[in-house]
Image: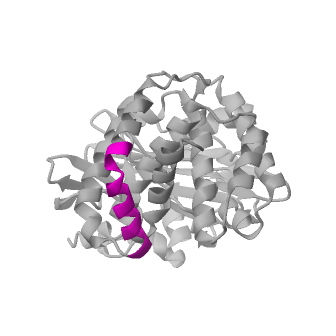
């Protein structure tokens, strides 16, 4: 098996690890042509990670989700039965609205949303997500989707069914089918073309309303923020050291400026340990950005509630400060500013914060720095040409202590 078939995919989250080997641990034969496989990859750390892979039989090299002519045929094969067996494992469909599946799947469009899963829109209003990297346990996309449909349905999708992989007492959600949301543009494109302060304010009010609803959702709270900051800081140091020689242009200049101010940055990181966390804690989106929000006619829609895929499910299901989502949105406005070559995103950010009903605070600055640090490591590993975006903001944050 050519491991590059997987490693080169957008959805493969372990690109920065040395993969020792990979193999199929379970194969569910859905028809003469299609199968759903679970692959195990063994990392140099000794860890084993699982990935779900819908495929044409005997064509491991072909990612079926990239070929629309197979989408409906595969799903119709899968939905012939509620439970599929494969050795000591099962693949099971869990229905929330069985009437939504009375008609077969037809015509599809692969969605180019900024996601780590694979998304397919089918004719008739069904939206499919395959979660490629598999984590054992209850999945926040399903859990939060069901809760929000009951309590906050106006700007989130309805869960129609989910698909699970069960083996040796462990339960993995591998896919979910939701009602398709009406939209004209992804918010990233909308604000890129039309940086409207009025709409930024609206988005802030909608996020505040979403958080207000989520306050009633159950979840454990563990204050891991300083620990996360330490993990991100250590990762950033290691990644910068490893990647500096590969940087070019503006990213290289940003790296040199950071290194010249290193002792100052270290002092700033240490000072953040004293920040008090006072904002409400609740279940949150956890990976919010303009690519996870849709827009149509004075209405925004929030999607993709799985959280940050690389974080363990139990942590993604914990309560966390609502200001983390707010900080993520500020960071997304700043990425859009850089991508669309705008001079400033300050007016959009202020309008958004006003709509949400929050002002600058030490806690918000903490989460902005924490998120920016995470982004800097991510860009060093995945998109070094983009490293300058979080790197310049990181340094400015330290030098000015401003939002």
Q: Which residues are magenta?
A: 249-264
Q: Residue at x 64, y 71 (%)?
A: 340
Towards the viewer: 146 or 184: 184
Q: x, y percentage for residue 398?
A: 47, 45
- Check the image and tell me how it is coloured: one colour
Q: Is residue 275 left or right of residue 190?
A: left
In the image, residue 216 sits, relative to residue 97, either above or below, namely above
Magenta stretch, main secondary structure, is helix
In the image, residue 33 sits, relative to residue 378, either above or below, namely below
In the image, residue 372 sits, relative to residue 342, either above or below, namely above
Quarter-of-image position of residue 120: bottom right
Q: x, y percentage for residue 160?
A: 63, 46
Towards the viewer: 23 or 47: 47
Q: Residue at x 65, y 25 (%)?
A: 215
Quarter-of-image position of residue 223: top left
Q: Is residue 86 left or right of residue 76?
A: left
Asked if residue 258 is among those painted magenta in the image, a careful observer would answer yes
Q: x, y percentage for residue 146?
A: 63, 36
Towards the viewer: 123 or 376: 376
Q: Residue at x 47, y 69 (%)?
A: 65
Q: Residue at x 59, y 27 (%)?
A: 282
Q: Is residue 110 left or right of residue 88?
A: right
Which quarter shows the N terminus? bottom left
Q: How many marks?
A: 0
- Residue 72 visible, this orientation: yes
Q: x, y percentage for residue 403?
A: 60, 44
- Residue 82 visible, this orientation: no
Asked if residue 397 is among those painted magenta in the image, a careful observer would answer no
Towards the viewer: 118 or 312: 312
């Amino acid at each position: 098996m050519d491991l590059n078939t997987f490693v080169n995919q957008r959805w493969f989250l372990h690109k920065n690890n040395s993969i020792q080997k990979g193999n199929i641990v379970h194969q569910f034969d859905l028809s003469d042509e299609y199968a759903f496989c679970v692959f195990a990859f063994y990392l140099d750390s000794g860890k084993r990670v699982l990935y779900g892979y819908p495929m044409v039989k005997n064509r491991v090299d072909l990612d079926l989700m990239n070929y629309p002519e197979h989408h409906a045929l595969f799903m119709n094969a899968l939905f012939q039965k509620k439970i599929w067996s494969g050795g000591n494992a099962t693949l099971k469909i869990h229905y929330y609205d069985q009437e939504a599946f009375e008609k077969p799947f037809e015509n599809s469009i692969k969605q180019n949303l900024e996601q780590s899963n694979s998304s397919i829109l089918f004719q008739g209003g069904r939206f499919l997500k395959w979660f490629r990297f598999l984590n054992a346990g209850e999945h926040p996309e399903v859990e939060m989707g069901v809760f929000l449909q009951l309590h906050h349905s106006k700007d989130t999708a309805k869960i129609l069914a989910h698909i699970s992989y069960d083996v040796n007492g462990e339960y993995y959600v591998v896919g979910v089918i939701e009602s398709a949301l009406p939209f004209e543009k992804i918010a990233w494109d909308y604000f890129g073309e039309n940086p409207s302060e009025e709409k930024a304010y609206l988005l802030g009010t909608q996020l505040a309303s979403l958080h207000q609803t989520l306050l009633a959702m159950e979840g454990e709270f563990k204050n891991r923020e300083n620990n996360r900051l330490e993990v991100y800081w250590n990762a950033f140091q290691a990644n910068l050291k490893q990647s500096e020689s590969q940087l070019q242009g503006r990213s290289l200049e940003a790296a040199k400026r950071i290194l010249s101010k290193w002792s100052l940055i270290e002092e700033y990181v240490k000072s953040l340990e004293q920040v008090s966390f006072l904002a409400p804690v609740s279940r949150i989106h956890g990976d919010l950005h303009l690519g996870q929000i849709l827009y149509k006619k004075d209405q925004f829609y929030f999607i993709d509630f799985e959280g940050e895929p690389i974080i363990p499910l139990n942590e993604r299901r914990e309560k966390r400060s609502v200001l983390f989502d707010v900080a993520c949105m500020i960071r997304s406005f700043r990425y859009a500013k850089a991508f669309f070559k705008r001079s400033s995103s300050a007016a959009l950010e202020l309008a958004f914060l006003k709509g949400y009903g929050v002002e600058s605070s030490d806690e918000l600055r903490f989460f902005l720095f924490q998120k920016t640090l995470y982004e800097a490591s991510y860009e060093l590993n995945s998109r070094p040409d983009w490293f300058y975006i979080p790197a310049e903001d990181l340094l400015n944050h330290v030098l000015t202590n401003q939002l």
